[in-house]
């Protein structure tokens, strides 16, 4: 029984940490939208977000 509690605690701790890291990285990607600092095409943006969305779907499966 204690083993399951340890596993649940580990999951919660890691899930929170990793989720926060993903959110932080997405915010950094959002910073790339500043056209005064970066130059990009809509195609590049679409490819970037399509790749992220595809990986998210793979992991959800």
Image: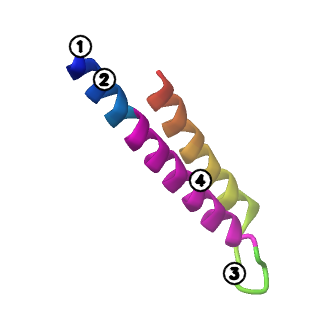
- The reply to whether discs 1 and 3 touch (Cβ–Cβ < 8 Å) is no
| Element under disc 1 | loop
Q: CA distance from mark 1 to mark 4?
A: 33 Å
Q: CA distance from mark 1 to mark 3?
A: 53 Å
Image spot of residue 16 (x, y percent): 48, 43
Q: Nearer the viewer, residue 43 or 27?
A: 27
Q: CA distance from mark 2 to mark 4?
A: 27 Å
Residue assigned mark 4: 23
Q: Nearer the viewer, mark 2 or mark 4?
A: 2
Residue assigned mark 2: 5
The chief SS type of the magenta part is: helix
Q: Nearer the viewer, residue 31 or 49?
A: 31
Can residue 32 be found in the magenta stretch? yes
Q: Residue at x 72, y 67 (%)?
A: 41
Query: Mark 1 or mark 3: which comes first in sequence?
Result: 1
Q: Nearer the viewer, mark 3 or mark 4?
A: 4
- Most extreme residue toward the top is 1
Query: Mark 3 or mark 4: which comes first in sequence?
Result: 4
Q: Which residues, given as a range, are shown in magenta?
A: 12-33
Mark 1 is surrounded, within 10 Å at the Cα level, by few (under 14), some (14 to 19) or many (20 or more) other residues, namely few
Query: Mark 2 or mark 3: which comes first in sequence?
Result: 2
Residue assigned mark 1: 1
| Element under disc 2 | helix
> Is 54 placed above or below 34 here?
above
Residue assigned mark 3: 38
């Amino acid at each position: 029984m204690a083993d399951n509690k340890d596993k649940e605690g580990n999951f919660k701790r890691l899930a929170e940490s990793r989720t926060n890291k993903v959110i932080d990285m997405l915010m950094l990607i959002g910073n790339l939208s500043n056209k005064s600092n970066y130059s990009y095409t809509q195609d590049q943006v679409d490819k970037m977000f399509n790749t992220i969305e595809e990986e998210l779907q793979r992991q959800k499966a």
